[in-house]
Amino acid sequence: MATPEREQAAGTAEARLEVCQIVGRLMELWGFRKNLGRIWALLYLGAEPMSAADIAGRLSISRGSASMSLQELLRWGVIRKSWKPGERKDFFEAEENVAKMVLRVLNERELPAIRGAIGELQGVIAHLERSGADRADPTLHRRTRDLLGITETGRSLFEGMVGPDGPAVPLWSVLRGGIEEKS
């Protein structure tokens, strides 16, 4: 017969894995591999750092996949290595400031892509205007300018969250009710 403690532990483990799955799906929507989100969530939800072998076991993934994913998460700065006295293996723990992580991704990945799209749209508009095609197809010209305007608005919103010098959390702090600390 299962004891209340065992039932509670099983419920906790099940809830933890469910949250890992949810975060993994969200990360896929953002263009990251699902295991990156699952591993980060597992570390974030835990009170203690975990080894690659522990992570692989908990998430039922190969050690190779865990190792590659951990290296990528380290490069993004969303986890860090830690050591336990007397242990030879590496342990990992999650960055706990979610706002800081989101802002880092916006600054390092999304903003450059948006800025690149703006430059390309400006190039198309300039070409249309130089060649006279803007008069030949005014709908194409107008709608390309509209797309440029929307993209520039998106850039302004992202820059408002990221700040001029990287993750300064100005707009994010306002959106979160001023509870996020500037780091």
Image (cartoon, grey):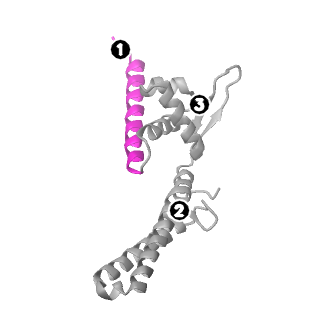
Mark 2 vs mark 1, foreground winner is: 2
Identify the residue at horizontal 57%, vertical 53% (top origin).
100
Q: Which residue is mark 1?
A: 2
Do residues under tags 3 and 2 come within 8 Å of each other at their CB atoms? Answer: no
Query: In the figure, is residue 106 to the left or right of 88?
Result: left
Q: Amino acid at mark 2?
A: Pro
Magenta residue span: 1-30
- Residue 177 appears in view: no
Question: Label 1 is placed on what type of residue?
Answer: Ala
Element class at badge 1: loop
| Rendered residue at 61%/61% (across/down) | 166
Q: Is residue 23 left or right of residue 177?
A: left
Dot 2, crowdedness within 10 Å: few (<14), some or many (≥20)?
few
Element type at marker 2?
Answer: helix
For marks 3 and 2, give the CA distance: 33 Å
Magenta stretch: includes residue 47: no
